[in-house]
Amino acid sequence: MSTQTHTPALRYQHNGWTPERQHRFLEHLAFNGSVSAAARHAGMSKQSAYWFRRQPYAREFAAAWEAALADSGRWVEDLAMDRLLDGEEEVIERDGAVVAVRRRPADVRLLLFQLQRLEDRRAAHRRLREAVMLERAQRRTQAERRPPDSASAAKLRAELRALVGLPPTGEPVPPCADLAISDDE
């Protein structure tokens, strides 16, 4: 999870959303993903947070909100993967003293959920890669269909004339006996 702030230019607001409160809200939102908890942590209401986010002058705040939620999503995924791999720690106490600590294996539903997410992610990457390859192929075919510009065409004609031994452009082409077409053929 990112601990750096996502907001390069938060401004003071007359409605109570000071830059400090905005930072506190966004940090807490990135940590736990809950708008209500983040607003309480910043000393503001959930409604005022949503209202402030919708304002045209709060674009930086809205973008930082999205980035914070993306961070919190990664944190939840990491936590789920840790629980899946390591299980869940269970502390057993008797009379206020820790008697034992044991690990319970992860629920099978969590395993199936994570496997489905991984497969969905792989499928999305595969679709993205195919779309990029298709786009590149379409660009190549469009470039091949485009007629060459006049400078490129003139250069290509001059190179071809030089290859077959014809004089450069502008000079008349001498008659060639082996290229003459007769009427009796």
Image (tube, grey):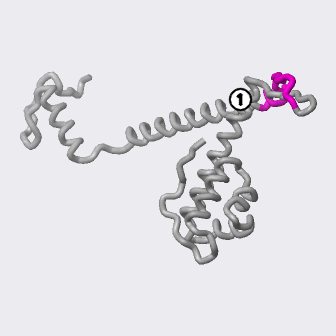
**Left or right of residue 146, residue 6 in this image:** right
- Across and down, in percent, residue 38 comes to 70, 57
Task: Say whether residue 50 is visible.
Answer: no
Residue 114, above or below 58: above
Label 1 environment density (alpha carbons within 10 Å; few <14, some 14–19, many ≥20): few
Q: Which residues are magenta?
A: 97-113
- Which residue is at 17% across, 27% downward? 180
Viewer-proximal residue among 116 and 173: 116
- Across and down, in percent, residue 182 comes to 20, 26
Q: Is residue 103 part of the magenta span, yes or no?
A: yes
Viewer-proximal residue among 103 and 167: 103
- Which residue is at 93% across, 31% downward? 95
Q: Assign the C terminus to one quadrant of the image.
A: top left
Find residue 82 and report its image quarter: top right
- Across and down, in percent, residue 6 comes to 54, 53
**Left or right of residue 90, residue 40 in this image:** left
Q: Assign the N terminus to one quadrant of the image.
A: top right
Q: Can you identify the residue that label 1 sits on?
A: 82
**Disc 1 residue type?**
Asp
- Which residue is at 68% across, 34% downward? 78
Q: Is residue 101 part of the magenta span, yes or no?
A: yes
Point out the residue furthest to the bottom here: 14
